[in-house]
Amino acid sequence: MIESQPTVLSLTDAAATKLHELTKEETNPDVGLRVYVYSGGCSGYRYGMMLEDAPTPDDQILQTNGVKVYVDGNSVSLLQGSQIDYVDTLMGAGFTVNNPNAVSGCGCGSSFRTADDAGTARSCAH
């Protein structure tokens, strides 16, 4: 019996709609959202997102809500089970990550720590 891998991450309808808006003029069929995690921030890790023209050989390629999402091999375990949302409030608009692996975060909202790796605390400066 083959066990299916759990989804690395998902997009809410709001996030998928915003990404469709951002890429509607794009003619490249491989354009997708790159989501990654890197060391930094006051809690140890930071999220990064950008539009990418094509995946790299190291990427897991996910098709979610009609949008391609690229996640590098190093970020997969840190993002497992996460959901990306797009929020538009009086305080501003942008993509957010709801990550079940994060055991604590930072006031800046873009830094987190996992139970397995406390990381090294750094300044919240962007």
Image: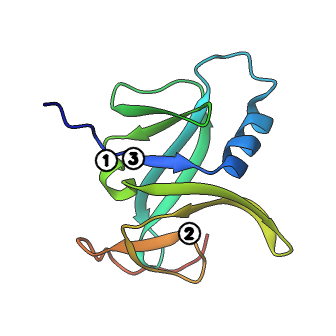
* Residue 61 screen position, x and y as percent: 43, 31
Q: Quadrant of residue 99?
A: bottom left
Q: Which residue is mark 3?
A: 8
Q: Position of residue 28 (x, y in %)?
A: 66, 17
Residue at 79%, 27% (x, y): give it. 24
| Sequence-first disc among 3 and 2 | 3
Marks 1 and 2 sit apart, C-alpha to C-alpha, by 18 Å
Q: Quadrant of the C terminus?
A: bottom right
For label 1, the SS is loop
Mark 2, residue position: 110
Q: Are marks 3 and 1 in contact (CB under 8 Å)?
A: no
Vertical placement of residue 44 versus 38, above or below: below
Instruction: Write down the quadrant of residue 100 in the picture.
Output: bottom left
| Extreme residue toward the left, this view | 1
Q: Please tell me whether residue 126 is drawn above or below residue 81 in the rendered image.
A: below
Identified by mark 1, the residue type is Asn
x, y percent for residue 64: 54, 37
Estimate how packed mark 3 is, as few (under 14), some (14 to 19) or many (20 or more) residues with alpha carbons within 10 Å: some
Q: Residue at x 31, y 47 (%)?
A: 74
For disc 1, the marked residue is 74
Q: Is residue 18 left or right of residue 32?
A: right
Q: CA distance from mark 3 to mark 2?
A: 19 Å
Foreground mark, 3 or 1, reads 3
Q: Earlier in the sequence, mark 1 or mark 2?
A: 1
Camera-side mark, 3 or 2:
3
Q: Residue at x 62, y 31 (%)?
A: 66
